Image (cartoon, rainbow, N blue to C red):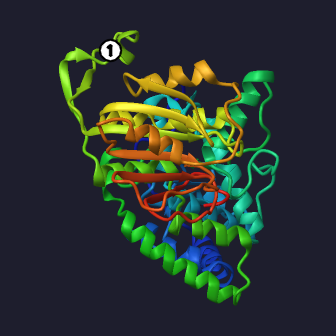
Amino acid sequence: METEADSPDTIEPCDLTPQQKQQWGDTMSLMTWTCPGFRHLFYKLLANNRGEIAAVPSRQVPIAATDARNIIINPDTFFKLSLKQRVFAIGHEIIHNVFDDVHFLHRCSKAGTVPMSDGTTRPFINKMMQHAMDYRINALLVDSKIGEPLPGICLDPEIGKADDSVVDIYKKIYDDAESDGRIVPGNSFDQLLTPGASTGQTPSQAQASRNPQQWKVETAAAQQLEAMKSQGKMAHALQRFFQQILEPVVPWTEHIKGIFNRKVGSGTYNWRKPDRRFITRDLYMPSRSGNGAGWVVVWADTSGSIGTDELCQYMAELTEIMESCQPKRLTICWCDAEIHRIDELEEPSDMDALKESIEGDKIGGGGTDMHPVLDWINQHSERPEIMIAFTDGYVTFPKAAPDFLMIWASTTNMEYPFGDVVRINPENA
């Protein structure tokens, strides 16, 4: 595990020469001409209001740096760059702040791990994470024709593209290094510092002082400035960048969690009964007690368009939501035109064991009809409180909506006659 090594606790400013002040003015002038939206973000949200220039000059950083409060430049090295390279460097630091990379790096450093998009983790290595962030940002700047890249930087489409997730890039770098010991080429010309290093704030104070709503408002203004400058021909990478920030794709599990929070309650905690998942790790954690939800039925459409392995993975990702709402009863119903298997789970965490027990099995493959599931439910005096249906939507629907809540976890853009719809395939969302 690495921490935020070599990051100074405080930043000591230094003076600029008259020539360097003139060079700074030239840099800002070119930013106004080539990337006005980025300059807007700089002066609105990151400008140093105590000095003669918007950045903080200090010899404690390599070429440039940021601490989520200011952009810091080393005048001895920064002004040796060409004019376009200086624009590239400042743009690079601005994007770090739009993504809030400094605080993410700090959280990973404290945890000692990096969360992956597939639910796993990797050990945290500071330099490796800073490289991962740089691959994404440098690709965005190059694709958007902002400034001129510095020689030898982290820039390789085989490793990271502008719209890649930083954790996916980190996973690739880490796994490649672990498998063959290969050192990923490229250098970081900048440094992400401890949050608040330039202002004397603690990391928690720096985090609290960031106003997400203000960042969103000013980023929307920056998007408009870039659109006006490009006259409707904004680079695709830049369009995707603004869309990612202003219209983020929320994971489908978060959509379902939101529906549960609005419509279904949650259980309470029991400190007398430990959570069995943590016992093997010598951690005494409270278990959930009480039931926030009644009977929850999960229908896995096994008609063939969704593989069994995919269905198992989808349901495993529901585990956290089920553990939060603590249903009184949890049933998994595997059905296409007929029911092939029914699993009654004692606890939500049993979803993982279920995944292991049937992973790779071929279940069903016929047409899709939800009537067998509804008929099976109607055989019980108990009624479900909610049903989650994993399906492609090519379903024979009943004429009337059932008398319980429905969530369609849909892998396509099919329309549904009732219930809440959550798209779980991001390509079709």
Q: Please report the residue visible at 33 percent of the width from the left and 31 percent of the height from the top.
A: 329
Give residue 178's quadrant in the image: top right
How far across and how far down the image is residue 130, in percent?
A: 61, 43
Is 233 drawn above or below residue 180 in the view shown?
Answer: below
Q: Please report the residue visible at 68 percent of the width from the left and 47 percent of the height from the top.
A: 367
Q: Is residue 192 visible?
A: no
How far across and how far down the image is residue 220, in percent?
A: 50, 77
Q: Nearer the viewer, residue 76 or 324?
A: 324
How far across and how far down the image is residue 339, in percent?
A: 57, 34
Q: How many marks?
A: 1
Residue type, label 1: Leu
User: Element type at marker 1?
Assistant: loop
Q: Please report the residue visible at 31 percent of the width from the left and 18 percent of the height from the top.
A: 275
Quadrant holding the N terminus = top right
Compared across the picture, whether 420 is left or right of 305 comes to left
Q: Nearer the viewer, residue 251 or 74?
A: 251
Is 167 drawn above or below residue 417 in the view shown?
Answer: above
For mark 1, does the 10 Å Cα neighbourhood hold few (<14), some (14 to 19), or many (20 or more) residues? few
Q: Nearer the viewer, residue 41 or 116?
A: 116
Give residue 29's quadrant in the image: bottom right
Q: Is residue 329 visible?
A: yes
Is 402 drawn above or below residue 234 in the view shown?
Answer: above
Q: Nearer the viewer, residue 324 or 196?
A: 324
Is 304 drawn above or below residue 271 in the view shown?
Answer: below
Look at mark 1 in the image and give the residue it sits on: 283
Compared across the picture, whether 154 is left or right of 403 comes to right
Quadrant holding the C terminus = bottom right
How far across and how far down the image is residue 331, in percent?
A: 43, 32
Q: Please report the residue visible at 41 percent of the width from the left and 35 percent of the height from the top.
A: 320
